[in-house]
Amino acid sequence: MRKLNMIQVVLLLIVAVIYNAEPTTPETVKIASWNIRIFSDGSRDDTELRHICQTLKDYDFIAIVELRDATVLQRAESMLETMGKDYNYQVSDQVGRGVKERYAFLYDKSKVAVIETGKIFSDPDDVFIREPYYATFRSGKFDFTIIAIHVIWGDTVAERRAESRSLAKVYNQVQEMDPYEQDVILTGDFNREPNDTESYTPLRNISSMTCLFTLPQKSHIKDSSLYDNIWFQADYLREYTGISGIDRFDETDWEHGNDSCENVNRPFRTRSRGI
C-alpha cells in the first residue's frame, strides 16, 4: 500500500489530518467521528441542520454514528453544497435489535474517493447489538479502511464490556481481508472510557495499538465522559502527525458559549473528534 508522510488529528468531531503527498491535491485530509444524537429527518429542522453542517464542513471525512435515516444525509449534502462544499456519502443498512440505526461515512469528493464500498461486519453469533460498518477510501496516496461502531448501552456495564472486548476480532478480521491494506482506523461511540482495562485489553494487545484520546479529556457535550475515540496501529498509520483535539463547537460556534450546552443537548450527543 502506498503511504503518506503524515497525519494530523483534530478533535471535536474526531478529526484526523493526513498528508497525502499528492502534488495535484491539497496535502492533508481531516478525518472526524461524530455521534449526532438521533440524527434523523424528523428530528432536525433546517436551523438545527445548518448548525450541524457548519461543523461538518470543517472536515474532509466524517464517520457518523446514531444516524436514523438517509433523508437527513441528503438534506445535509444539499445544505453543504450551498456552503460551497461537494460531499458524498456511504451509508449502511439498518442495524440494531430494537431501535434501528445506521452508520454513515460523509466525505469531501475533492479530497477523498471510495475504494471499497461500505459493508456491515458479519455477526452470525449476534455479538453486537449494532454490527460494525466499514469501508476503504483513498485521499491522494493515502489508502485507509475505517470501521465505525456504536457499542451497546444496555442494562449493565458487563454488556458494554463484552462488545468492546469483541472489537479486537473485528479489527483483525477486517485488516486480514486485504493483505495490502494495513491502515485500519476504528472509531465511534464505545460507551466505555479508554482506561477500562476489562473493555479494551484485547484491543490493546494488538501490536502498537493506540487510542487518540485519554482522560481527563471529555467528548460528551456536558463534559461527563470520554466514550468516543479513535484507535489505530501506530506502526502502520505512520502518516499521523501527532496533532489531535476535540472540537468544542458547543463553546465556540454557538451564540451563548457554555450556556449553549442545554440547547445543543438535543441535536448533539457528543462533540466531534478526529485524527
Image: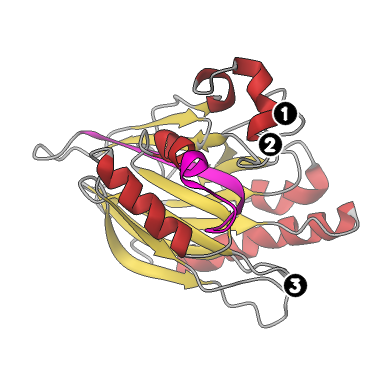
Whichever of callouts 1 and 2 sits on the residue coming sooner in the sequence is 1
Count every numbered label the image shows and give the total: 3
Magenta highlight range: 27-49
Label 1: which residue? 222
Query: Do the numbered discs 1 and 2 sit on residues whose CB atoms are within 8 Å?
Result: yes
Residue 170 image position (x, y, % from top left): 59, 65
Query: Do the numbered discs 3 and 2 sit on residues whose CB atoms are within 8 Å?
Result: no
Label 2: which residue? 265
Determine which quarter of the picture holds residue 193: top right
User: Would residue 156 be found to the left or right of residue 104 on screen?
Assistant: right
* Dot 1 alpha-carbon crowd within 10 angstroms: few under 14, some 14 to 19, many 20 or more: some
Q: Secondary structure at mark 3?
A: loop
Q: Secondary structure at mark 1?
A: loop
Q: Secondary structure at mark 2?
A: loop
Q: At 59% across and 38% down in the image, what residue appears? A: 211
The CA distance from mark 1 to mark 2 is 8 Å
Whether residue 171 is situated above or below residue 186 in the rendered picture: below
* Dot 3 alpha-carbon crowd within 10 angstroms: few under 14, some 14 to 19, many 20 or more: few
The CA distance from mark 1 to mark 3 is 27 Å
The CA distance from mark 3 to mark 2 is 23 Å
Between residues 175 and 268, which one lies in front from this camera angle?
Answer: 268
Instruction: Assess whether residue 34 is covered by the magenta stretch.
Output: yes
Amino acid type, residue under disc 2 in the picture = Asn
Residue 7 image position (x, y, % from top left): 36, 34
Whichever of callouts 1 and 3 sits on the residue coming sooner in the sequence is 3
Q: At 47% across and 57% down in the image, what residue appears? A: 72
Label 3: which residue? 98
Between residues 226 and 38, which one lies in front from this camera angle?
Answer: 38
Residue 243 got which mark?
A: none
Amino acid type, residue under disc 1 in the picture = Lys
